[in-house]
Amino acid sequence: MAHGKFEFKGDGISFLWLCIWTGFLCFITIGIYSPWAYCEIEKWKAKNTYIDGKQLVFKGTGGGIFGTWLLIFFLSFITLGIYMPWGMCRIIRWKTNNLYYADTGDVEKN
């Protein structure tokens, strides 16, 4: 039997701003900023997501995924994209391992 209430409280303007500045940083760094941009987007999604009234927090960092990101890019390139599904599973596993319920110190005041 399903239970639990999921709620998302994000708004379009804050996500637009996030996409603009992370996209700009990715552009000027020729994509090197991509892992950090990914983490910023995951932090925004977690910050705006609640499960049974409990806010989520994402604690991953771009530096924490950078090596894996490079490996996935390299293996996908040399296998002509065949490695991509396994690479995506590695990223999703890493993301899930860095997603928590927010503690009192993790919650930002609006």
Image: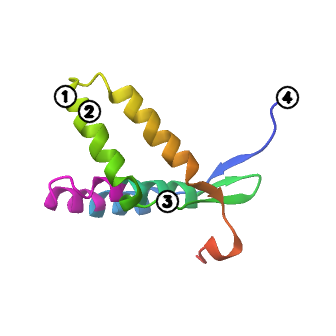
Q: Which mark is residue 75?
A: 2
Mark 3 to mark 2: distance in Å? Answer: 27 Å
Earlier residue among tags 4 and 1: 4
Instruction: Name the residue carrying label 4.
Output: 1
Instruction: Name the residue carrying label 3.
Output: 43
* Residue drawn at 43 percent across, 63 percent down: 14
Q: Is residue 44 magenta?
A: no
* Residue drawn at 29 percent across, 60 percent down: 22
Q: Which mark is residue 78?
A: 1
Query: Which residue type carries mark 2?
Result: Leu
Query: Which residue type carries mark 1?
Result: Ile
| Image location of residue 54, percent across then percent down | 73, 59
Judged from the image, the secondary structure of the residue bearing numbered disc 1 is helix
User: Label 1 near label 2: C-beta < 8 Å?
Assistant: yes
Q: Which mark's residue is nearer the viewer, 2 or 4?
A: 2
| Image location of residue 4, percent across then percent down | 78, 43
Q: Quadrant of residue 37?
A: bottom left
